[in-house]
Image (cartoon, rainbow, N blue to C red):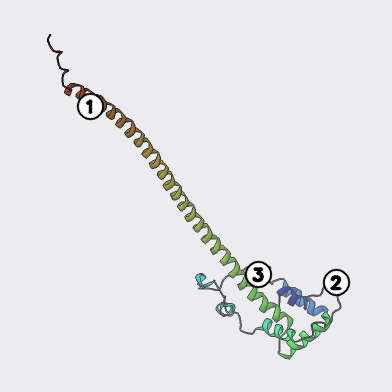
Amino acid sequence: MAWNKLKSLFVVTEGQPTTISAEDNAVIEAALAHTPEAVPAELPPDTDRSKLSGTIDFQGLYDQAGIPNTDEVEALEKFLVELDHDLPQASKLSSAKAFLKAIGKSSTDVLTDAARKIRVVRAVADSKSADSQHAITTEQAAIDGLQQQIDDHRAAIEAAKRDLESVKAQCTTEESRLQGARMFFGVMDQLTDDPKPAAPPKR
């Protein structure tokens, strides 16, 4: 059951019938002044933040925070689940107060228990948000670094290709020059080696 839904059983809005007394309402309002918005979130001492992942053991964190294992919120939740959902709000409130009285608790005990636990829950969310943001920033920086390396390697590949084409072009030009010289001197050699034409016969 959500906090606001549970809180609505004890905090009466305008126009709703109620059986709560003015004195009880004052006590509840005083308790609400410290729950949960006014209570700063704080992780229990010695919390291993690396374990705030996957399925969270909230009860273990509550115990670590030294929250009395009275479970007023959980007990009331279980009781309310058994109630007819169509019951008027005033009837649910009366039933809830009767149940709490039977177990020796009050609405203030529920609000206090919820406030203590919400403080831990919010601390878990805040801590996880901070750690996740740090991890994301670190990983993004690593990605950016790798991307720069990739870009550098691609630039090196392109430079190698350009250098290869340049060298190949120079080699082609040089070979053409040498082949020209070879062909020239080859022809000259052939002309030198040809036998002299026979002298015409004397008459």
Residue position for label 2: 14
| In the displayed structure image, the side of residue 7 where residue 126 appears, left or right | left
Identify the residue shown where x is 46% and y is 47%: 151
Closer to viewer: mark 2 or mark 1: 1
Mark linked to residue 39: 3
Q: Which image quadrant is residue 75 in?
A: bottom right
**At which x and y percent is residue 40?**
63, 68
Sequence-first tag of 2 and 1: 2
Q: Disc 1 to disc 3, how far (Cα)?
A: 101 Å
| In the displayed structure image, the side of residue 178 where residue 125 appears, left or right | right
Identify the residue shown where x is 74% and y is 84%: 80
The amino acid sitting under disc 3 is: Val
Mark 3, secondary structure of its residue: loop
- Label 2 neighbourhood size at 10 Å, few (<14), some (14-19), many (20+)? few
Residue placed farthest to the top in the image?
Answer: 203
Identify the residue shown where x is 27% and y is 29%: 178
**At which x and y percent is residue 189?**
19, 24
